[in-house]
Amino acid sequence: MKTIQAYRFALDLTPGQERAVLAHAGAARVAHNWALARVKAVMDQRAAERTYGVPDDFLTLSMSWTLPALRKTWDAVKEQVAPWWRECSKEAFNTGLDALARGLKNWADSRSGKRAGRPVGFPRFKSRRRTTPSVRFTTGTIRVESGRKHVVLPRLGRLKLHESARKLARRLEAGTARIMSATVRRDGGRWHVAFCVEVERCGRTPARPDSVVGVDVGITHLAVLSTGELADNPRHLTVAQARLRTLGRALSRKQGPDRRIGRRSSKRWERTAARLGRAHARVANLRRDGIHKLTTRLAREHGTIVVEDLNVAGMLANRRLARHITDVGFAEIRRQLTYKTQWNGGRLIIADRWYPSSKTCSGCGAAKAKLALSEREYHCEACGLVMNRDRNASLNLAALAAEFDPAGSGPVAARGADRKTRVRGQVAVKREPGTASAGQTGTVPPQGRTADHVLTRAH
Protein backbone atom coordinates (compact mmCIF):
# COMPACT_ATOMS: atom_id res chain seq x y z
CA MET A 1 0.00 0.00 0.00
CA LYS A 2 1.45 3.35 -1.07
CA THR A 3 0.67 6.38 1.03
CA ILE A 4 1.93 9.92 1.52
CA GLN A 5 3.53 10.40 4.92
CA ALA A 6 5.45 13.22 6.59
CA TYR A 7 8.62 12.92 8.66
CA ARG A 8 9.38 15.98 10.79
CA PHE A 9 12.70 16.64 12.50
CA ALA A 10 14.04 19.52 14.58
CA LEU A 11 17.06 21.42 13.26
CA ASP A 12 20.09 22.94 14.96
CA LEU A 13 20.98 25.84 12.67
CA THR A 14 24.01 28.06 12.92
CA PRO A 15 23.44 31.85 12.84
CA GLY A 16 24.55 31.93 9.21
CA GLN A 17 22.22 29.10 8.22
CA GLU A 18 19.32 30.75 10.03
CA ARG A 19 19.92 33.98 8.09
CA ALA A 20 19.94 32.00 4.84
CA VAL A 21 16.66 30.26 5.67
CA LEU A 22 15.08 33.59 6.65
CA ALA A 23 16.25 35.06 3.34
CA HIS A 24 14.54 32.24 1.45
CA ALA A 25 11.35 32.68 3.49
CA GLY A 26 11.48 36.43 2.77
CA ALA A 27 11.86 35.73 -0.94
CA ALA A 28 8.73 33.56 -0.84
CA ARG A 29 6.86 36.39 0.89
CA VAL A 30 8.02 38.97 -1.68
CA ALA A 31 6.88 36.82 -4.61
CA HIS A 32 3.54 36.13 -2.94
CA ASN A 33 2.82 39.78 -2.18
CA TRP A 34 3.89 41.00 -5.62
CA ALA A 35 1.71 38.47 -7.44
CA LEU A 36 -1.24 39.18 -5.13
CA ALA A 37 -0.91 42.93 -5.78
CA ARG A 38 -0.85 42.24 -9.52
CA VAL A 39 -3.97 40.07 -9.36
CA LYS A 40 -5.84 42.63 -7.24
CA ALA A 41 -4.88 45.46 -9.59
CA VAL A 42 -6.28 43.58 -12.60
CA MET A 43 -9.47 42.64 -10.75
CA ASP A 44 -10.03 46.20 -9.52
CA GLN A 45 -9.39 47.61 -12.98
CA ARG A 46 -11.93 45.28 -14.58
CA ALA A 47 -14.49 46.09 -11.88
CA ALA A 48 -13.99 49.82 -12.41
CA GLU A 49 -14.37 49.47 -16.18
CA ARG A 50 -17.64 47.63 -15.73
CA THR A 51 -19.01 50.54 -13.70
CA TYR A 52 -18.25 52.78 -16.69
CA GLY A 53 -20.32 50.56 -18.96
CA VAL A 54 -17.40 49.06 -20.88
CA PRO A 55 -18.46 45.86 -22.69
CA ASP A 56 -16.85 42.62 -21.54
CA ASP A 57 -15.01 42.21 -24.84
CA PHE A 58 -13.13 45.48 -24.26
CA LEU A 59 -12.22 44.97 -20.59
CA THR A 60 -8.64 44.67 -19.43
CA LEU A 61 -7.42 41.14 -20.03
CA SER A 62 -7.87 38.94 -17.01
CA MET A 63 -4.87 37.34 -15.31
CA SER A 64 -4.56 33.60 -14.93
CA TRP A 65 -4.26 32.32 -11.33
CA THR A 66 -2.59 28.99 -12.05
CA LEU A 67 0.91 28.36 -10.75
CA PRO A 68 2.53 28.06 -14.23
CA ALA A 69 0.96 31.38 -15.28
CA LEU A 70 2.03 33.16 -12.09
CA ARG A 71 5.55 31.75 -12.41
CA LYS A 72 5.80 32.92 -16.04
CA THR A 73 4.66 36.41 -15.06
CA TRP A 74 7.12 36.52 -12.18
CA ASP A 75 10.06 35.40 -14.35
CA ALA A 76 9.37 38.28 -16.73
CA VAL A 77 9.67 40.97 -14.04
CA LYS A 78 11.91 39.48 -11.33
CA GLU A 79 14.93 41.49 -12.50
CA GLN A 80 13.06 44.73 -11.73
CA VAL A 81 11.09 43.57 -8.67
CA ALA A 82 13.85 41.54 -6.97
CA PRO A 83 17.27 42.19 -8.50
CA TRP A 84 18.77 40.01 -5.77
CA TRP A 85 16.82 36.93 -6.89
CA ARG A 86 19.99 34.96 -7.71
CA GLU A 87 20.94 34.86 -4.04
CA CYS A 88 18.02 32.50 -3.26
CA SER A 89 16.84 29.23 -4.72
CA LYS A 90 14.09 29.38 -7.31
CA GLU A 91 12.10 27.14 -4.98
CA ALA A 92 11.73 30.05 -2.56
CA PHE A 93 9.82 32.16 -5.09
CA ASN A 94 7.87 29.08 -6.19
CA THR A 95 6.78 28.59 -2.56
CA GLY A 96 5.11 32.00 -2.41
CA LEU A 97 3.52 31.71 -5.85
CA ASP A 98 2.20 28.22 -5.12
CA ALA A 99 0.61 29.40 -1.85
CA LEU A 100 -1.11 32.25 -3.71
CA ALA A 101 -2.34 29.98 -6.51
CA ARG A 102 -3.88 27.55 -4.02
CA GLY A 103 -5.41 30.39 -2.00
CA LEU A 104 -7.03 31.97 -5.05
CA LYS A 105 -8.36 28.63 -6.25
CA ASN A 106 -9.87 27.86 -2.85
CA TRP A 107 -11.47 31.31 -2.75
CA ALA A 108 -12.94 30.93 -6.26
CA ASP A 109 -14.21 27.38 -5.57
CA SER A 110 -15.78 28.51 -2.30
CA ARG A 111 -17.67 31.34 -4.00
CA SER A 112 -18.92 29.10 -6.81
CA GLY A 113 -19.98 26.30 -4.47
CA LYS A 114 -17.41 23.77 -5.66
CA ARG A 115 -15.67 23.74 -2.27
CA ALA A 116 -17.53 22.45 0.78
CA GLY A 117 -17.12 23.77 4.29
CA ARG A 118 -16.75 27.26 5.62
CA PRO A 119 -16.43 30.18 3.19
CA VAL A 120 -12.83 30.90 2.20
CA GLY A 121 -11.74 34.52 2.19
CA PHE A 122 -9.65 36.29 -0.40
CA PRO A 123 -5.88 35.87 0.14
CA ARG A 124 -4.14 38.54 2.20
CA PHE A 125 -0.71 40.09 2.01
CA LYS A 126 1.90 38.41 4.17
CA SER A 127 3.54 40.48 6.89
CA ARG A 128 7.27 40.27 7.55
CA ARG A 129 6.76 40.10 11.33
CA ARG A 130 3.55 38.13 11.71
CA THR A 131 4.00 35.51 8.99
CA THR A 132 5.55 32.17 9.99
CA PRO A 133 8.81 31.77 8.02
CA SER A 134 8.57 28.77 5.71
CA VAL A 135 10.10 27.57 2.44
CA ARG A 136 9.45 24.39 0.47
CA PHE A 137 11.87 22.54 -1.82
CA THR A 138 10.60 20.14 -4.48
CA THR A 139 13.62 19.85 -6.80
CA GLY A 140 17.37 19.74 -6.43
CA THR A 141 19.49 17.82 -3.94
CA ILE A 142 17.30 16.64 -1.07
CA ARG A 143 18.76 13.79 0.95
CA VAL A 144 19.50 12.43 4.40
CA GLU A 145 23.20 11.78 4.95
CA SER A 146 24.48 8.36 5.95
CA GLY A 147 25.24 9.52 9.50
CA ARG A 148 21.51 10.25 9.89
CA LYS A 149 22.27 13.46 11.80
CA HIS A 150 22.43 15.83 8.81
CA VAL A 151 20.25 16.66 5.81
CA VAL A 152 21.19 18.36 2.56
CA LEU A 153 18.87 20.90 0.93
CA PRO A 154 19.30 23.04 -2.21
CA ARG A 155 21.27 26.27 -1.67
CA LEU A 156 21.09 25.80 2.11
CA GLY A 157 23.62 23.00 2.09
CA ARG A 158 24.26 20.61 4.97
CA LEU A 159 22.01 21.22 8.00
CA LYS A 160 22.43 19.51 11.36
CA LEU A 161 19.48 17.70 12.90
CA HIS A 162 18.66 17.93 16.58
CA GLU A 163 17.61 14.26 16.51
CA SER A 164 18.42 11.19 14.49
CA ALA A 165 16.60 10.62 11.18
CA ARG A 166 17.03 6.85 11.37
CA LYS A 167 13.32 6.09 10.81
CA LEU A 168 13.33 7.84 7.46
CA ALA A 169 16.86 6.74 6.57
CA ARG A 170 16.00 3.07 7.02
CA ARG A 171 13.12 3.31 4.59
CA LEU A 172 15.20 5.24 2.06
CA GLU A 173 17.99 2.65 2.24
CA ALA A 174 15.50 -0.20 1.84
CA GLY A 175 13.92 1.48 -1.19
CA THR A 176 10.42 1.65 0.36
CA ALA A 177 10.28 5.47 0.50
CA ARG A 178 10.82 8.35 -1.91
CA ILE A 179 11.22 11.97 -0.82
CA MET A 180 8.85 14.24 -2.72
CA SER A 181 9.52 17.57 -0.99
CA ALA A 182 11.11 19.17 2.07
CA THR A 183 9.72 22.14 4.00
CA VAL A 184 11.77 24.21 6.44
CA ARG A 185 9.61 26.08 8.93
CA ARG A 186 10.02 27.90 12.23
CA ASP A 187 7.50 26.74 14.83
CA GLY A 188 7.52 27.70 18.49
CA GLY A 189 10.95 29.32 18.29
CA ARG A 190 12.59 26.21 16.79
CA TRP A 191 13.31 25.34 13.17
CA HIS A 192 11.99 22.07 11.75
CA VAL A 193 12.32 20.27 8.44
CA ALA A 194 9.38 18.17 7.25
CA PHE A 195 9.85 15.63 4.47
CA CYS A 196 6.83 14.69 2.39
CA VAL A 197 7.52 11.06 1.53
CA GLU A 198 5.79 8.46 -0.62
CA VAL A 199 5.99 5.31 1.50
CA GLU A 200 5.34 1.71 0.55
CA ARG A 201 3.72 0.26 3.66
CA CYS A 202 3.34 -3.46 4.18
CA GLY A 203 -0.05 -4.88 5.07
CA ARG A 204 -0.70 -5.11 8.79
CA THR A 205 -3.38 -6.70 10.93
CA PRO A 206 -4.53 -5.47 14.34
CA ALA A 207 -3.60 -7.58 17.34
CA ARG A 208 -7.29 -8.41 17.82
CA PRO A 209 -8.95 -8.21 14.38
CA ASP A 210 -12.41 -9.16 15.68
CA SER A 211 -12.33 -6.70 18.56
CA VAL A 212 -14.83 -3.82 18.49
CA VAL A 213 -14.32 -0.79 20.73
CA GLY A 214 -16.48 2.29 21.16
CA VAL A 215 -14.62 5.49 21.97
CA ASP A 216 -16.45 8.31 23.74
CA VAL A 217 -14.24 11.38 23.98
CA GLY A 218 -14.83 13.97 26.66
CA ILE A 219 -13.35 16.49 29.06
CA THR A 220 -13.29 14.62 32.36
CA HIS A 221 -11.53 11.75 30.59
CA LEU A 222 -9.78 12.06 27.26
CA ALA A 223 -11.52 8.89 26.10
CA VAL A 224 -13.80 6.30 27.70
CA LEU A 225 -13.66 2.92 25.97
CA SER A 226 -16.41 0.35 25.84
CA THR A 227 -13.94 -2.11 27.39
CA GLY A 228 -14.09 -0.08 30.60
CA GLU A 229 -10.72 1.61 30.19
CA LEU A 230 -10.47 5.29 31.08
CA ALA A 231 -7.87 7.43 29.33
CA ASP A 232 -6.97 10.34 31.58
CA ASN A 233 -7.14 13.90 30.29
CA PRO A 234 -3.80 15.54 31.26
CA ARG A 235 -5.23 19.08 30.70
CA HIS A 236 -1.95 20.50 29.42
CA LEU A 237 -3.36 23.98 28.79
CA THR A 238 -4.84 24.23 32.30
CA VAL A 239 -1.55 23.17 33.87
CA ALA A 240 0.38 25.76 31.86
CA GLN A 241 -2.18 28.54 32.33
CA ALA A 242 -0.37 30.17 35.24
CA ARG A 243 2.88 30.48 33.30
CA LEU A 244 1.09 31.70 30.17
CA ARG A 245 -0.65 34.43 32.14
CA THR A 246 2.60 35.53 33.77
CA LEU A 247 4.33 35.77 30.39
CA GLY A 248 1.32 37.55 28.89
CA ARG A 249 1.40 40.21 31.60
CA ALA A 250 5.15 40.63 31.22
CA LEU A 251 4.70 41.05 27.47
CA SER A 252 2.03 43.72 27.93
CA ARG A 253 4.43 45.80 30.03
CA LYS A 254 7.07 45.88 27.28
CA GLN A 255 7.15 48.27 24.34
CA GLY A 256 5.56 46.40 21.48
CA PRO A 257 5.29 47.32 17.79
CA ASP A 258 2.80 49.93 16.64
CA ARG A 259 2.15 50.17 12.92
CA ARG A 260 0.14 53.39 13.23
CA ILE A 261 3.16 55.44 14.36
CA GLY A 262 5.84 53.23 12.83
CA ARG A 263 7.26 52.12 16.17
CA ARG A 264 9.30 48.94 16.30
CA SER A 265 9.22 46.57 19.23
CA SER A 266 11.92 46.60 21.86
CA LYS A 267 14.40 43.76 22.31
CA ARG A 268 12.86 42.86 25.63
CA TRP A 269 9.43 42.63 24.02
CA GLU A 270 10.81 40.29 21.34
CA ARG A 271 12.50 38.05 23.91
CA THR A 272 9.35 37.84 26.03
CA ALA A 273 7.22 37.15 22.95
CA ALA A 274 9.59 34.31 22.01
CA ARG A 275 9.27 32.84 25.52
CA LEU A 276 5.49 33.02 25.30
CA GLY A 277 5.55 31.34 21.92
CA ARG A 278 7.73 28.52 23.23
CA ALA A 279 5.33 27.99 26.15
CA HIS A 280 2.38 27.65 23.78
CA ALA A 281 4.39 25.34 21.53
CA ARG A 282 5.17 23.09 24.49
CA VAL A 283 1.46 22.75 25.30
CA ALA A 284 0.71 21.84 21.68
CA ASN A 285 3.54 19.30 21.57
CA LEU A 286 2.44 17.61 24.79
CA ARG A 287 -1.15 17.42 23.55
CA ARG A 288 -0.08 16.01 20.21
CA ASP A 289 2.17 13.42 21.83
CA GLY A 290 -0.59 12.13 24.12
CA ILE A 291 -3.12 11.87 21.31
CA HIS A 292 -0.62 10.04 19.09
CA LYS A 293 0.07 7.46 21.79
CA LEU A 294 -3.64 6.85 22.41
CA THR A 295 -4.68 6.58 18.75
CA THR A 296 -1.71 4.40 17.81
CA ARG A 297 -2.50 1.93 20.59
CA LEU A 298 -6.18 1.76 19.61
CA ALA A 299 -5.45 1.29 15.90
CA ARG A 300 -2.87 -1.45 16.51
CA GLU A 301 -4.98 -3.38 18.98
CA HIS A 302 -8.61 -3.26 17.79
CA GLY A 303 -10.00 -4.25 14.41
CA THR A 304 -13.03 -1.90 14.52
CA ILE A 305 -13.20 1.49 16.22
CA VAL A 306 -16.42 3.48 16.54
CA VAL A 307 -16.39 7.22 17.30
CA GLU A 308 -18.91 10.04 17.17
CA ASP A 309 -19.23 12.86 14.68
CA LEU A 310 -19.24 15.72 17.19
CA ASN A 311 -20.45 19.25 16.50
CA VAL A 312 -17.36 20.89 17.98
CA ALA A 313 -18.23 24.34 16.61
CA GLY A 314 -21.57 24.22 18.42
CA MET A 315 -19.97 22.94 21.62
CA LEU A 316 -17.60 25.91 21.64
CA ALA A 317 -20.59 28.21 22.10
CA ASN A 318 -20.53 27.22 25.78
CA ARG A 319 -18.06 29.78 27.07
CA ARG A 320 -17.53 27.86 30.30
CA LEU A 321 -16.27 24.77 28.50
CA ALA A 322 -14.82 26.21 25.28
CA ARG A 323 -11.21 26.33 26.52
CA HIS A 324 -11.37 22.79 27.92
CA ILE A 325 -12.92 21.47 24.70
CA THR A 326 -10.19 22.96 22.53
CA ASP A 327 -7.55 21.64 24.94
CA VAL A 328 -8.70 18.06 24.32
CA GLY A 329 -8.48 18.12 20.51
CA PHE A 330 -11.55 16.12 19.42
CA ALA A 331 -10.92 16.66 15.71
CA GLU A 332 -7.27 15.59 16.00
CA ILE A 333 -8.26 12.30 17.64
CA ARG A 334 -10.63 11.49 14.81
CA ARG A 335 -8.15 12.60 12.12
CA GLN A 336 -5.39 10.38 13.48
CA LEU A 337 -7.70 7.39 13.89
CA THR A 338 -8.79 7.79 10.27
CA TYR A 339 -5.39 7.17 8.71
CA LYS A 340 -3.96 4.92 11.43
CA THR A 341 -6.79 2.40 11.08
CA GLN A 342 -6.00 2.25 7.37
CA TRP A 343 -2.30 1.72 8.03
CA ASN A 344 -2.97 -1.09 10.51
CA GLY A 345 -5.67 -2.88 8.52
CA GLY A 346 -8.54 -1.84 10.79
CA ARG A 347 -11.80 -0.04 10.24
CA LEU A 348 -13.16 3.24 11.58
CA ILE A 349 -16.92 3.76 11.89
CA ILE A 350 -18.24 7.26 12.54
CA ALA A 351 -21.66 7.48 14.17
CA ASP A 352 -24.11 10.03 12.88
CA ARG A 353 -24.04 13.40 14.63
CA TRP A 354 -27.65 13.01 15.81
CA TYR A 355 -27.25 9.53 17.27
CA PRO A 356 -28.13 9.89 21.01
CA SER A 357 -25.35 7.72 22.40
CA SER A 358 -25.50 9.39 25.81
CA LYS A 359 -29.30 9.43 26.06
CA THR A 360 -29.83 5.80 25.02
CA CYS A 361 -29.72 2.94 27.52
CA SER A 362 -27.11 0.38 26.54
CA GLY A 363 -29.15 -2.33 28.24
CA CYS A 364 -32.68 -2.04 26.87
CA GLY A 365 -32.40 0.62 24.15
CA ALA A 366 -34.77 3.16 25.70
CA ALA A 367 -33.81 6.78 25.02
CA LYS A 368 -34.39 9.75 27.25
CA ALA A 369 -35.83 12.97 25.88
CA LYS A 370 -33.35 15.12 27.80
CA LEU A 371 -30.14 14.48 29.68
CA ALA A 372 -28.50 17.38 31.48
CA LEU A 373 -24.75 17.77 31.21
CA SER A 374 -24.50 17.74 34.99
CA GLU A 375 -25.91 14.20 35.18
CA ARG A 376 -22.77 12.07 35.18
CA GLU A 377 -24.63 8.85 36.04
CA TYR A 378 -27.12 7.37 33.60
CA HIS A 379 -30.30 6.08 35.27
CA CYS A 380 -32.64 4.12 33.00
CA GLU A 381 -36.27 4.40 34.07
CA ALA A 382 -37.27 1.40 31.94
CA CYS A 383 -34.85 -1.30 33.10
CA GLY A 384 -33.25 0.35 36.12
CA LEU A 385 -29.71 0.36 34.69
CA VAL A 386 -27.30 2.66 36.54
CA MET A 387 -23.99 3.32 34.81
CA ASN A 388 -21.43 6.01 34.19
CA ARG A 389 -22.72 8.32 31.48
CA ASP A 390 -19.61 8.11 29.27
CA ARG A 391 -19.27 4.34 29.66
CA ASN A 392 -22.90 3.95 28.60
CA ALA A 393 -22.24 6.09 25.51
CA SER A 394 -19.19 4.03 24.56
CA LEU A 395 -21.19 0.79 24.79
CA ASN A 396 -23.84 2.24 22.49
CA LEU A 397 -21.16 3.23 20.00
CA ALA A 398 -19.65 -0.26 20.07
CA ALA A 399 -23.10 -1.74 19.38
CA LEU A 400 -23.30 0.25 16.14
CA ALA A 401 -20.56 -1.93 14.61
CA ALA A 402 -22.90 -4.92 14.62
CA GLU A 403 -25.56 -2.78 12.95
CA PHE A 404 -23.18 -1.72 10.22
CA ASP A 405 -21.79 -5.21 9.56
CA PRO A 406 -23.88 -8.23 10.65
CA ALA A 407 -20.89 -10.49 9.83
CA GLY A 408 -23.01 -12.91 7.85
CA SER A 409 -25.38 -13.79 10.68
CA GLY A 410 -28.45 -12.23 9.07
CA PRO A 411 -30.37 -9.15 10.22
CA VAL A 412 -29.30 -7.87 13.61
CA ALA A 413 -31.56 -5.85 15.88
CA ALA A 414 -30.05 -2.41 16.19
CA ARG A 415 -30.77 0.99 17.65
CA GLY A 416 -31.38 4.06 15.56
CA ALA A 417 -32.33 7.57 16.58
CA ASP A 418 -34.61 10.37 15.66
CA ARG A 419 -32.86 13.34 14.16
CA LYS A 420 -33.61 15.08 17.44
CA THR A 421 -34.85 13.30 20.55
CA ARG A 422 -38.54 13.93 21.15
CA VAL A 423 -39.48 16.20 24.02
CA ARG A 424 -42.24 14.07 25.51
CA GLY A 425 -41.83 10.46 26.59
CA GLN A 426 -39.06 7.99 25.95
CA VAL A 427 -38.05 6.90 22.50
CA ALA A 428 -37.05 3.28 22.00
CA VAL A 429 -36.97 2.89 18.23
CA LYS A 430 -35.42 -0.23 16.73
CA ARG A 431 -33.97 -0.09 13.25
CA GLU A 432 -32.70 -2.88 11.06
CA PRO A 433 -29.61 -2.46 8.86
CA GLY A 434 -30.25 -0.92 5.48
CA THR A 435 -33.46 0.93 6.32
CA ALA A 436 -31.99 4.44 6.25
CA SER A 437 -32.91 6.69 3.38
CA ALA A 438 -30.20 7.80 1.02
CA GLY A 439 -30.50 11.41 2.09
CA GLN A 440 -29.81 10.77 5.78
CA THR A 441 -26.08 10.25 5.58
CA GLY A 442 -23.51 11.37 8.08
CA THR A 443 -20.55 13.55 7.24
CA VAL A 444 -18.45 13.21 4.12
CA PRO A 445 -15.93 10.33 4.44
CA PRO A 446 -12.38 11.57 5.03
CA GLN A 447 -9.74 11.43 2.32
CA GLY A 448 -8.85 7.86 1.48
CA ARG A 449 -12.34 6.54 2.36
CA THR A 450 -11.11 4.85 5.51
CA ALA A 451 -14.17 5.66 7.62
CA ASP A 452 -17.58 4.03 7.38
CA HIS A 453 -20.49 6.25 8.35
CA VAL A 454 -23.47 4.82 10.17
CA LEU A 455 -26.79 6.15 8.90
CA THR A 456 -29.71 7.08 11.12
CA ARG A 457 -33.33 7.32 10.07
CA ALA A 458 -35.44 10.45 10.51
CA HIS A 459 -39.13 9.86 11.28
Image (cartoon, helix red, strand yellow):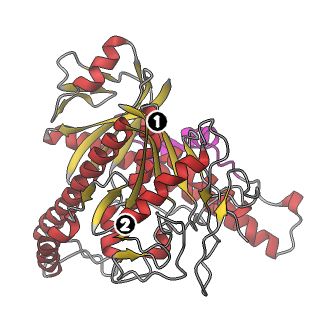
Residue hosting label 1: 346
Left or right of residue 434, residue 117 in this image: left
Which residue is rendered at x = 37% and y = 66% of the image? 390
- Residue 37 lies in quadrant: bottom right
Q: Residues within 10 Å of mark 1 (few under 14, many from 20)?
A: many
Residues rendered magenta in the picture: 63-89
Q: Nearer the viewer, mark 2 or mark 1?
A: 2
Expressed as whole percent of the image width and height from the top left, the position of residue 384 reads: 42, 75
In this view, the residue in front, 273 or 41, is 273
> Which element carries disc 2, helix, strand or loop?
helix
Kindly identify the amino acid type of the residue bearing the numbered disc 1.
Gly
Q: Is residue 226 above or below residue 321?
A: above
Kindly identify the amino acid type of the residue bearing the numbered disc 2.
Asp
> Which element carries disc 1, helix, strand or loop?
loop
Expressed as whole percent of the image width and height from the top left, the position of residue 343 reads: 43, 32
In this view, the residue in front, 53 or 439, is 439
Which residue is rendered at x = 58% and y = 46% of the image? 452
Is most of the magenta stretch helix, strand or loop? helix
Q: Earlier in the sequence, mark 2 or mark 1?
A: 1
In the rendering, which numbered label is found on residue 390? 2
Which residue is rendered at x = 52% and y = 78% of the image? 368
- The answer to whether the residues at label 2 and label 1 have Cβ atoms under 8 Å apart is no
Left or right of residue 119, residue 143 in this image: left
